Image: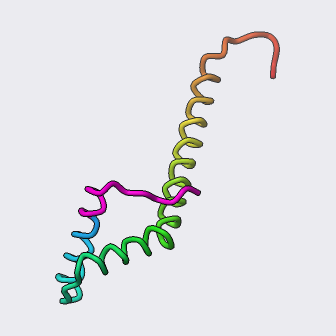
Amino acid sequence: MKPIKFSREETQAIVGEIREYFREELEQDIGSMPAEMLMGFLADRIGPYFYNRGLYDAQAMIHKRMDGLADEVFALEQPTRHLR
């Protein structure tokens, strides 16, 4: 898997979210550098779990749609004397 990369703007937004979480939930102020390091850790170590979950969810949705399409194709079948 390719490493997860974020633009500078995305990184700043994520770092801001981490800092806000620490302030509001943990009553701790952390600097941008520790927040960016935490972001890097989460992206490298935890990110693949979220990424894979997204893939599994997309795969399930595709299977569901394909099943629906197969049903629609069978509904187009014309009656004949030949039985499948």
Q: In the depicted view, which residue is nearer to us: 73 or 24? A: 24
Give the percent coordinates (x, y) of residue 18. 27, 74
Residue at 28%, 65% in the rendered image: 14
Give the percent coordinates (x, y) of residue 27. 18, 89
Q: In the depicted view, which residue is nearer to us: 46 or 36? A: 36
How many circles with numbers are drawn on the protein? 0
**Highlighted range, magenta:** 1-13
Q: In which quarter of the image is residue 77?
A: top right
Give the percent coordinates (x, y) of residue 82. 82, 14
User: Is the residue 55 above or below the residue 45 in the image?
Assistant: above
Query: Would residue 10 be found to the left or right of residue 75 on screen?
Result: left
Give the percent coordinates (x, y) of residue 22. 23, 82
Residue at 33%, 54% in the rendered image: 7
Image quarter in which the C terminus is found: top right
Q: In the depicted view, which residue is nearer to us: 14 or 75? A: 14
Residue 4 among those drawn in magenta: yes
Query: Would residue 57 be found to the left or right of residue 40 on screen?
Result: right
Residue 38 among those drawn in magenta: no
Name the colouring of the figure. rainbow
Image quarter in which the N terminus is found: bottom right
User: Is the residue 58 above or below the residue 21 in the image?
Assistant: above
Query: Would residue 53 be found to the left or right of residue 10 on screen?
Result: right
User: Is the residue 25 above or below the residue 56 in the image?
Assistant: below
Q: Which residue lies furthest to the bottom in this view?
A: 27
